[in-house]
Amino acid sequence: MKALVGGTVLPVSHPPIKDGVVLFDEHSGKILTVGKRSKVKIPEDTEVIDVSGKYISPGFVDAHSHIGMIPDGLEWEFQEANDFYSPIAPHLRAIDGFDPYDEAFNDAIAGGVTTVATGPGSANVMGGVGLIAKTYGDGFEKVINPEAFLKMALGPKRPREYKSKLPYPTTRMGTVAFMRIWFKRAQDFMEGKIKEENIDTEEKEMLNLLAKALKREIQVKIHLSTSPDEIYAVLRIIKEFNLNATIDHAFGSQLVVDMLSKENVPVIYGPPMIARIASFFRYVSDEAPVLLFKKGVNVSIMTDHPVLPEKHLRLLAAAVARNGLSLDEALKLITINPAKALGIDKFVGSLEPGKDADIVVSSGHPINPTSRIEIVFGKGKEVFRNE
């Protein structure tokens, strides 16, 4: 066992603990005890690590990334996130194109990011199945859920690039119609109105995957990045088919905060600080996550790596915080909130007994941009030390 002793513990689920202790087991990879040093009994055989003057927080969670799918440098000829053979491709699997040896994983660990959701891009209406992975571990040991979510997307498409037997949508109403038609076809398949013997193997794979989404066995991650009216369109689909979904990017959400506060749909915003380099980025706002947070929306922020580097996730939280969040509130945007959005908060997102010992030790509060990440533990094992 190991114990981090003497630092300020930021459990996230509870108020900060000064002169605290985090006791964890590197063999089980789990947190055992979190509390004030004066109240925690540390077993005699424990390796005690004095972190007095430091801060101890959960490993950070990026709920929307393309790490392992698109290499650093945006070298699109090597990207594995967007396949243009069909606008409807829910049966594609990110794990079949995932590179667990992407150098960005080491950078992510150095930035305190220990868990990521990564997968297909936004070129397709339905682009395939994404995965959730740790940033540490050997090869495909990183992957903790190879079938975590179905990626769907509104927003600008590149129809000339499709090489498809299917027609492609060229407007928002066409894109939403495709979503609706294929979910209804999956409903017919589930009800036996479409017989397996009457469809080819590819369509069978597609409908089986969509059936999982309809049964809420797999989450749906919906990209929208153009304008707030897309949010209304997405919510209509979510409600019509009772999907377990997240709204990703959500540029323009600052204009519909009151409406979103009434919906039980997590928002994974961003990335903040991105330049307005195209017309569909005109609604980018660093203030939007603050407004959503204060209205009770489960909001997280993303890097959309490699759009912004994975290692800078905490700095994006810092940029958002200056618009009206405390440092502790901003920390939730990259810990417990994304964990809840992804449905993995039983394992990560806060420092609590029984959760993965993904732990970050920093020189100051992790959301303070002048703080350094000093030590990172992944399931109780030291995976980074800033020396």
Image: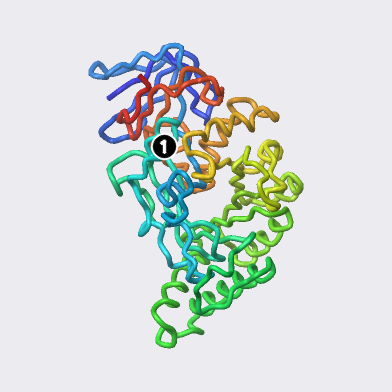
Left or right relative to 344: residue 168: right
Tell me residue 287's x, y (percent): 70, 36
Left or right relative to 18: residue 141: left
Residue found at the far bottom of this picture: 198
Q: Is residue 121 above or below residue 308?
A: below
Tell me residue 101's x, y (percent): 32, 45
Q: Secondary structure at mark 1?
A: strand
Q: Is residue 86 above or below residue 35?
A: below
Which residue is at a point 63% across and 68% down the rendered structure image?
A: 175
Residue found at the far left of this picture: 45
Residue 123: name its quadrant: bottom right
How is the structure coloured here?
rainbow
- Residue placed most toward the observer, 185 or 248: 248
Quadrant (top left, top right, bottom left, bottom right) of the N terminus: top left
Which residue is at a point 42% across and 57% down the rendered structure image?
A: 80
* Residue position for label 1: 114
Q: Is residue 57 above or below residue 107?
A: above
Quadrant (top left, top right, bottom left, bottom right) of the C terminus: top left
Tell me residue 38's x, y (percent): 42, 12
Numbered-mark total: 1
Tell me residue 311's x, y (percent): 47, 34
- Residue placed most toward the observer, 24 or 55: 55
Amino acid beneath label 1 = Thr
Disc 1: CA contacts within 10 A as few (<14), some (14-19) or many (>=20): many
Which residue is at a point 52% across and 44% down the rendered structure image?
A: 340
